[in-house]
Amino acid sequence: CVGSSWCRYGVGNSVDFAVTVENRYKGLRAPHKLKSAVSGCIRECAEASCKDFGMIAVEGGYDLYVCGNGGVTPKHGVLLAASIDDETVLKYLDRFLMYYVL
């Protein structure tokens, strides 16, 4: 998803936020590989709701989804928090990943 930088439907700058998230969690040792995505609007081009954790830009921030699966038995993630700002997303992800990794 190219977000508001290049898409007329973009609500949030998903590219910059995705880079921030990637740099924050790269090298994290987890029991399994983690997949994440950031979508710039509710059209969800990056398919954020079916990743281990994903953020979808909405008016007022991001919706944070966790525990999705796009494999053999696909399922949508659970909405953990709605309309939260970037810093709060990272704070919630820190806690979620601490729980997952331990």
Image (spheres, rainbow, N blue to C red):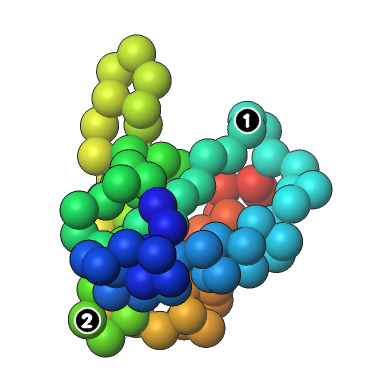
Mark 2 = which residue? 59
Residue beneath the point at 36% across and 57% down: 39
> In the rendered structure, are the residues bearing label 2 and label 1 in contact, judged by CB atoms less than 8 Å apart?
no
Point out residue 73 in the picture as x, y percentages from the top left corner. Answer: 29, 18
| Residue extending furthest toward the top | 72
Tell me if I can see residue 82 in this picture: no
Task: Count residues near mark 1 (Cα–Cα under 10 Å), then give few for <14, some for 14-19, many for 20+.
Answer: few
Residue beneath the point at 58% across and 55% down: 97
Q: Which amino acid does label 2 sit on?
A: Glu
Residue beneath the point at 53% across and 69% down: 17
Point out residue 3 in the picture as x, y percentages from the top left corner. Answer: 38, 64
Q: What residue type is labelled 1?
A: His
Q: Regarding mark 2 in the picture, which secondary structure is present there?
A: loop
Residue 32 circle label? 1
Relative vertical location of residue 9 with respect to residue 22 in this rendering, above or below: below
- Between residue 20 and residue 81, name the one nearer to us: 20
Relative vertical location of residue 55 with respect to residue 32 in this rendering, above or below: below
- Between residue 19 and residue 69, name the one nearer to us: 19
Residue 41 circle label? none
